């Protein structure tokens, strides 16, 4: 028989099969020899009390053989001679859209402005060491999108939007550790993601899809309110009947192309702020309420959110054991983000701490219409770069100095490899953002005793939390509200926020695109 249980155990017991078997045998009052296997279905940490427990949902196999389940059956078809749909962007939305098109018998032709995952690494090294920004290949652009080198956090609240487990199954099938299906806050790690992305690419190519790297789309041409052609950087024009637009939150040139061609886009709110770095040991002590976390607990994350003056101030993309990275997409701007390796074993933790913005904040750029938020975002990034002398160093302050309005006389070494410039962050951000950040940090310090320390350093800015533009679509067909054949998709279109939700949206758009192509027979 198989018995399902929800239990709480110590971190050590959850990590050692023989201890877990002992615990289960006592609980069920059966001889542990009769337990042939214990399958962990879900796992989460309960750190609310001084004694930390691990919550487990398990299946106990009693006197029967355990046979591993295959949760997903792929139905990929050979699409070499099939109808075609074009995709712009090889991030999670674009890649999962391509896989879904193949399952539906449609040939995906995918254009990616950047390089494949292996060749991207040289450009990441250049921005880090030489402060040289490649506008087509960087932390945001290239195979796998921004998530590939921003560590693959898979937690999502978008469970009502689609099948999260299917996305995780596909990632596991392409090389991710099966733990991502178990852990409450799954994470792959920047060191492991590139191989998984490469495997997904190979699946797309194996079944007849096409992927064109180093291929930037420079114009989207419509006729009679329908998508007609795509123009590539090399001057070539491609006939296009269906287009899944999955370009990500930083593809400003695409927003400008749509705006220039009078294809409706809308300004939207987003969040913007700083990235703060603490020692991981301190965060462990705060979260686990102990001097040392021990061998059986992972580096501690945190998630904090408060309302300040009618705006949300909250942590974003928190990276235990992580590194702060330079994520500019054009020369003359500075952008930060964070990532962690799979083991999250670095000495630092970092997190974005951001302030909710409203469309009324963008009045300075109201002449830019729907692009007002984008220019607001860009202006702050350019100010930061000017303070850094045109390099990829970031303006920075120690945390207490920031709260007290002091320029830091010295800065400790942080994980941000291009380097820091001691600066007054009032010169980067408008006053209301500074004021809200200060008040937010003070509230966070009340919640997390020890969080407010001058050993912590804030790096500015954290500005690419989400797209500053929404591309409106019909909620039934998922096509653009005015131009048929265009499927605005994922983070860049304003319909996702993270790898899993972007992948889900890519699948949804691909299904609708396939249905439309098949109905036109």
Image (cartoon, rainbow, N blue to C red):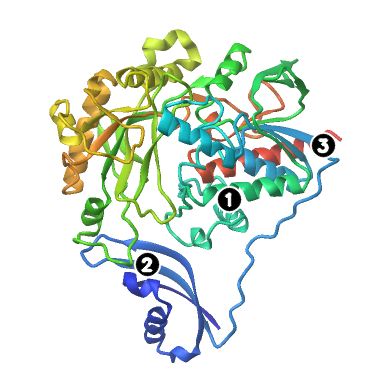
Q: Image point 16% across, 48% down: which residue?
A: 450
Q: CA distance from mark 3 to mark 1?
A: 29 Å
Residue 127 showing in the rendered view: yes
Mark 3 and mark 1 residues within 8 Å of each other at the beta carbon: no
Secondary structure type for disc 1: helix
Q: Position of residue 226 (x, y in %)?
A: 73, 21
Q: Which quadrant holds the N terminus?
A: bottom right
The total number of labels drawn is 3
**Residue 24 at what x, y percent from top left?**
40, 81
Q: Which residue lies at the image location 19% right of the left edge and 45% below the top edge?
A: 451
Question: Residue at label 2?
Answer: 55
Which is more toward the observer, 25 or 194? Answer: 194
Q: Residues within 10 Å of mark 3 (few under 14, many from 20)?
A: some
Q: Quadrant of residue 241?
A: top right
Q: Are marks 3 and 2 in contact (CB under 8 Å)?
A: no
From the image, tell me which residue sits under label 3: 83
Q: Nearer the viewer, residue 128 or 269?
A: 128
Q: Quadrant of residue 519?
A: top right
Disc 2 packing (10 Å; few <14; some 14–19; many ≥20):
some
Please determine whether, in this image, residue 197 is positioned above or below residue 134: below
User: Gap between marks 3 and 2, in whole Å?
Assistant: 48 Å
First reached walking from the N terminus: tag 3 or tag 2: 2
Rendered-image quadrant of the C terminus: top right
Q: Nearer the viewer, mark 1 or mark 2?
A: 1
In x, y percent, where is residue 455? Answer: 18, 41
Contact between marks 1 and 2 (CB within 8 A): the answer is no
Mark 2 or mark 1, which is nearer the start of the sequence?
2
CA gap, disc 1 to disc 2?
Answer: 31 Å
Image coordinates for residue 51, horizontal then vertical, percent: 23, 67
Q: Which mark is residue 195?
A: 1
Residue 318 horizontal side relative to residue 327, left or right: left
Considering the numbered disc 2 on the image, is that residue within a helix, a strand or a loop? strand
């Amino acid at each position: 028989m198989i018995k399902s249980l929800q239990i709480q155990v110590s971190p050590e017991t959850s990590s050692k099969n023989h201890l877990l078997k002992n615990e289960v045998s006592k609980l069920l009052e059966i001889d542990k020899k009769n337990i042939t296997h214990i399958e962990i279905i879900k796992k989460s940490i309960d750190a609310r009390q001084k004694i930390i427990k691990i919550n487990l949902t398990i299946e106990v196999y009693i006197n029967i053989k355990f046979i591993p389940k295959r949760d997903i059956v792929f139905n990929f078809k050979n699409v070499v001679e099939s109808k075609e749909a074009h995709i712009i962007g090889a991030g999670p939305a674009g890649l999962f859209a391509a896989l879904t098109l193949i399952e539906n018998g449609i040939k995906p032709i995918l254009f990616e402005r950047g390089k494949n995952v292996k060749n991207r690494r040289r450009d990441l090294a250049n921005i880090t060491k030489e402060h040289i920004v490649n506008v087509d290949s960087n932390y945001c652009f290239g195979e796998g999108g921004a998530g590939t080198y921003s560590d693959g956090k898979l937690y999502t609240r978008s469970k009502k939007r689609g099948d999260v487990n299917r996305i995780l199954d596909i990632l596991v099938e392409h090389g991710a550790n099966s733990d991502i299906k178990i852990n409450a806050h799954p994470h792959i790690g920047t060191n492991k993601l590139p191989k998984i992305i490469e495997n997904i690419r190979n699946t797309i190519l194996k079944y007849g899809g096409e992927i064109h790297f180093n291929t930037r789309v420079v114009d989207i041409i419509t006729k009679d309110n329908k998508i007609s052609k795509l123009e590539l950087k090399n001057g070539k024009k491609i006939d296009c009947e269906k287009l899944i637009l999955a370009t990500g939150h930083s593809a400003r040139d695409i927003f400008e192309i749509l705006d220039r061609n009078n294809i409706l886009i809308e300004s939207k709110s987003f969040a913007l702020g700083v990235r703060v770095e603490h020692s991981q040991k301190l965060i462990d002590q705060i979260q686990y309420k102990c001097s040392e976390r021990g061998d059986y607990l992972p580096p501690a994350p945190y998630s904090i959110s408060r309302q300040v003056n009618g705006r949300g101030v909250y942590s974003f993309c928190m990276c235990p054991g992580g590194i702060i990275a330079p994520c500019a997409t054009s020369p003359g701007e500075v952008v930060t983000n964070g990532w962690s390796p799979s083991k999250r074993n670095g000495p630092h933790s970092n997190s974005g701490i951001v302030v909710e913005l409203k469309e009324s904040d963008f009045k300075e750029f109201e002449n830019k219409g729907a692009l007002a938020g984008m220019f607001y975002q860009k202006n702050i990034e350019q100010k930061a770069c000017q303070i850094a002398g045109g390099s990829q160093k970031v303006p920075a302050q120690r945390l207490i100095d920031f709260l007290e309005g002091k320029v830091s006389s010295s800065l400790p070494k942080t994980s941000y490899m291009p380097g820091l410039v001691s600066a007054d962050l009032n010169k980067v951000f408008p006053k209301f953002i500074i004021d809200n950040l200060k008040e937010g940090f003070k509230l966070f310090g009340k919640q997390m005793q020890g969080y407010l320390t001058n050993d912590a350093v804030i790096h500015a800015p954290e500005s690419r939390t989400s797209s500053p533009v929404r591309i409106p679509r019909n909620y039934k067909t998922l096509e653009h509200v005015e131009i048929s054949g265009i499927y605005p998709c994922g983070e860049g279109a304003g319909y996702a926020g993270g790898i899993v939700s972007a992948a889900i949206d890519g699948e949804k758009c691909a299904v609708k695109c396939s249905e439309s192509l098949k109905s036109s027979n």
